Amino acid sequence: MIIQQLVNGFSVGAVYALIAVGFGLVFNVLKFSNFSHGSTMGISAYIAYLFAMKFHLSIVPTVSIGTIAGGICAVLVELIAFRPLRKRGGQIVYFFVTSITMLMLLENILVIFFGDTFYAFPKMIASTAITVAGVSISTLYLVMLGCSVCALALLSYWLKYTKMGVAIRAASCAINTCNLMGANVDAVISWTFFVAGLMAGLSGSLLGISYTLYPQIGQIVVKGFIASVVGGLGNLTGAVVGAILLGILEVFFIATIGAGLTPAATFAIMVLFLFLRPQGVAGTIVRDKA
Amino acid sequence: MLDIKELYVSYGRITALQGVSMHVPRSSIVCIIGNNGAGKSTLLNAISGMVKPKSGEITFEGRPLPAHPHQIVKAGIVQVPEGRQVFPILSVDENLTMGGYVLSYREIRERKARVYELFPRLKERAGQAAGTLSGGEQQMLAIGRALMSSPKVILFDEPSLGLAPMVVSQVFELIAKIKESGVTVVLVEQNARKALSVADTAYVLENGKVVLEGRASELLENPMVEAAYLGGRKSA
Ligand SMILES: Nc1ncnc2c1ncn2[C@@H]1O[C@H](COP(=O)(O)OP(=O)(O)OP(=O)(O)O)[C@@H](O)[C@H]1O
Ligand SMILES: [Mg+2]
């Protein structure tokens, strides 16, 4: 029973990790907390939903469409909202405020088009379970886990072995020096948003398919934010660890004290964690960067 | 090969360069000396496209320079910035990848092999985070990174800053070697005696203006330069 909860928590945490990593990528390069990441999740989940309904898609194409929609959406948000600010040399706080404004704006656009109601994706994942070594794991959680782990592995490969991936990591050290090496900063930033958006799109559609779809689904970005702070802001591995911790905590609390009290309890634990270890899970690495 | 005419650069109200003109001949070392705040880094950053001049023009091989830093690197002008600026969390190898950003993957592999040949120490430390290298090794990495794209011109901004005397000598030997290989060098230095002894021509910058220019060997003998920039360092 405990092991089963652990696996479930791990799976939910892996989806949060997608959010946290996307959030962290943009933070690393542009040094601001991009809450509009949440609206990217929401919009791509709705786009995935529309396609799934219209064309009776199965899970793989649905999630793929959601993922790509997320990438495109994030690039557009950067182009429309953040790039003009950057060209004028705006301060970090303006980026932050703009990102929250974009979250609200896009959320309300979803309300206008879809109403403030819940939608359910057509049933895509059989509600069966697989039993491994006496532990039964539902297919739903396995799909969440599988998609997230694959996406994170691909991302980490891409960041390590492609020129653009290395440039994004270089830009998170010093964007001007990255420019001085011959990388086009606008392109590096667009790619950062694109890749972060892919992660947002994937997590948004997975969450929509697993639970329900509602305009405020993007507010789950807060969990990604908390996870990346717990992980040590600026460190992607830390963000993944933080997100998985968060997922496991949540599942355990839901099983023990109930869904109603869970948010309060998890946030309390996270605050306590930051109180004890303000530098986050990966504190030392982040300090090296400062 | 690189010509600068009447360049004015300002940061808001501060005017950092006031009508600087300069000629950088092919395959030579041009050295720029001047006190803190004279505008040396500003001049290099204007060439690199990192700051936009208010007026004046820079031509490279007879054509105006492209507008953006990445295009300027592609055209063949790279900078080894002040304070080295290696990417601390990237490995040595990844720092070199960044130096070769404008190249194809295959070219990057080939150039890396050349750079590692030149700096065996970097090869030993290829997988190590650049932030954990010593100051001297970081400077070697910064230079190796600049060499990655096979540039025509390298701009050095105070490469000897904060290095032990022996390493400083190595750096200057390396700069001389780079010139011998046909690369044009613009060298900004506080260490005026050493810089003037490797350079062909030199410019003295004060408050954003060129106050003196000539053959480096002549400037080395010039009493004004002696007093202002070489004073008390004769033994160095
Ligand atoms: N980003 C900036 N914003 C505002 N003023 C600047 C900026 N960069 C340089 N300046 C100013 O421009 C002038 C020239 O600076 P610059 O860095 O070019 O001097 P430098 O000759 O390289 O000095 P140092 O030897 O200390 O490196 C200085 O007065 C400096 O304060
Ligand atoms: Mg300087």
Image (cartoon, rainbow, N blue to C red):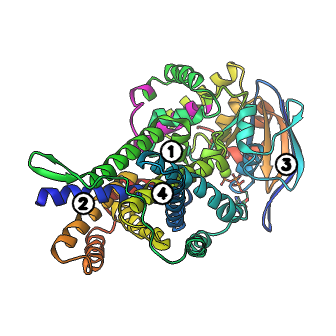
Percent position (x, y) of residue A3?
13, 56
Q: Position of residue B103 (x, y in %)?
A: 63, 28
Secondary structure type for disc 4: helix
Q: Where, by quadrant of the figure, is residue A212 drawn?
A: bottom left
From which residue to which does the magenta span run?
Answer: B123-146
Decide which of B232, A34 is in the foreground and name it: A34
Image mark 3: chain: B
**Element class at badge 1:** loop
Distance from disc 2 to disc 1, alpha carbons, whole Å, reads 36 Å
Residue lying at 50% horizontally and 65% vertically, measured from the top left: A42
Residue identifier under label 3: B211
Q: CA distance from mark 4 to mark 3?
A: 57 Å
Q: Chain of mark 4?
A: A
Which SS class for mark 3?
strand
Relative side of A247 to A252, left or right: right
- Mark 4 = which residue? A200
Residue position for label 2: A9
**Amino acid bearing label 4:** Ala
Q: Residues within 10 Å of mark 1 (few under 14, many from 20)?
A: many
Tell me, yes or no, whether dots 3 and 1 are on the same chain: yes
Q: Does label 4 lie on the same chain as label 2?
A: yes
Residue on which the image places disc 1: B87
Chain designation of label 1: B
**Which residue type carries mark 3?**
Val
Q: Residue at x 30, y 71 (%)?
A: A274
Magenta residue check for B140: yes
- Vertical relation: B168 (above or below) B229: above
Label located before the other in sequence (2 or 4): 2
Q: Quadrant of the C terminus of chain A?
A: bottom left
